[in-house]
Structures are given as C-alpha cells and as structure tokens.
Image (cartoon, rainbow, N blue to C red):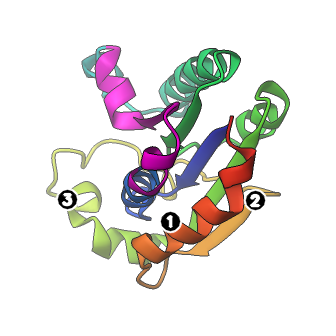
Amino acid sequence: MIIWIIGLGGSGKTSLAKRLYKTAKPKTDNLVLLDNPEIRNLFGGSDDKEFTPKIRRKLTNRLQKICQLLDRSKINAICSILCPFEDIRRKNRKLFSKYYEIFLDAKIDIVKKRKANLYSPKSKWAKTPKVGIEIPFEEPRKPDLILNSNIKIDFSKTANKIYQTIRTKLL
C-alpha cells in the first residue's frame, strides 16, 4: 500500500507521516517512510533549487517511480509530499495495487505563520516560487481522508485512527 500524504508546505505532512510510521512500523515490518526533501537530496537536490512547476513535477515523478518499485515488491510506503498536481494523484490510483491519499487542508495564511522560515521574504527561499502562492495547488478531487490543518492536529491520535483504518489493507 502506498500512503500519499499531501498538502501545502507547513500543513503538517512530515509530522503526520513520521507519527504514522512510528505507529504502524512495530506491527508492519515491510514499511518505509519517504519524505520528499530526503528523496530530493538523494538525487542531488542542489540541481532542483528553482522549484518551478516543471522541477516539482520531475521530483514528484521520481517519488512515484520509487513507490512503483516498492509496491511491486510488496513493501508499504508512507510518502510525505507536497504534490500539487491532480493528474499525478489520479495516476497513482491506477499505478499502485493499494493507494490511500491523505490531504492536509490548510489555508496559505495559516501555513505562512506556521512555517515563517519558508515563506518569509527574508528567507533563503524568498525567490523560490511557492506552491499556493506563485504555483497553484490543485486540491484533490477524491482524497481518502481530509484533515483540517488550519487547527492544531493531535498527530498521535490522528495516526492511530488512520492506522486502524488502513491496517487490514497493508501488504
């Protein structure tokens, strides 16, 4: 099963992914956690500093291909990724044997406050196009779960509930 956790930068994707992994791993040996910044660095992220829509699509396709390999090998993956492209998410539903999409829904004003180091005009990312501002985020049409990330999420409780929902579907 591929669990694809999406949302704007600062919506809580990585926090939820790490907590879900911590919850599920003791009961699921064949489980990996893939956080998109780690994948980007693995493939020489310094080449991808622009973060244009074209570069973001390339990065997302890389993660999707890694997940295809894991899925074929019957390895479950929790993926934390911004993924603003609905067409890629639709393709995921066809590519993977089992797919569960979680959307952390947060308003741009909320994530700007939450992740000031990313959104600040003085940050090292100031000239980088941001998803939700310069780059549109295509909201998912049919995610399996929507979490309101405008309010504080108890990631431990949320991860436990998600695990109870998906545990019988894990490979």
The quarter of the displayed image where residue 3 is located: top right
The earlier-in-sequence mark between 1 and 3 is: 3
Number of other residues with Cα within 10 Å of mark 1, as a class: few under 14, some 14 to 19, many 20 or more? many
- Quadrant (top left/top right/bottom left/bottom right) for the N terminus: top right
The residue located at (30%, 28%) in the rendering is 49
Disc number for residue 117: 3
- Quadrant (top left/top right/bottom left/bottom right) for the C terminus: top right
Q: What amino acid is at disc 2?
A: Asp
Q: Which structural element holds mark 1?
A: helix
Circle 1/circle 3 CB separation < 8 Å: no
The residue located at (46%, 85%) in the rendering is 151
| 31 is within the stretch colored magenta | yes
* Mark 1, residue position: 159
Looking at the picture, tell me which residue is in the foreground, 149 or 145: 145
Looking at the picture, tell me which residue is in the foreground, 168 or 128: 168
Looking at the picture, tell me which residue is in the foreground, 133 or 151: 151
Residue 51 in the image, given as x and y percentages of width and height: 41, 33
Residue 71 appears in the figure: yes
Q: What amino acid is at disc 3?
A: Asn
Residues in magenta, as a range = 22-43
Residue 33 in the image, given as x and y percentages of width and height: 43, 38
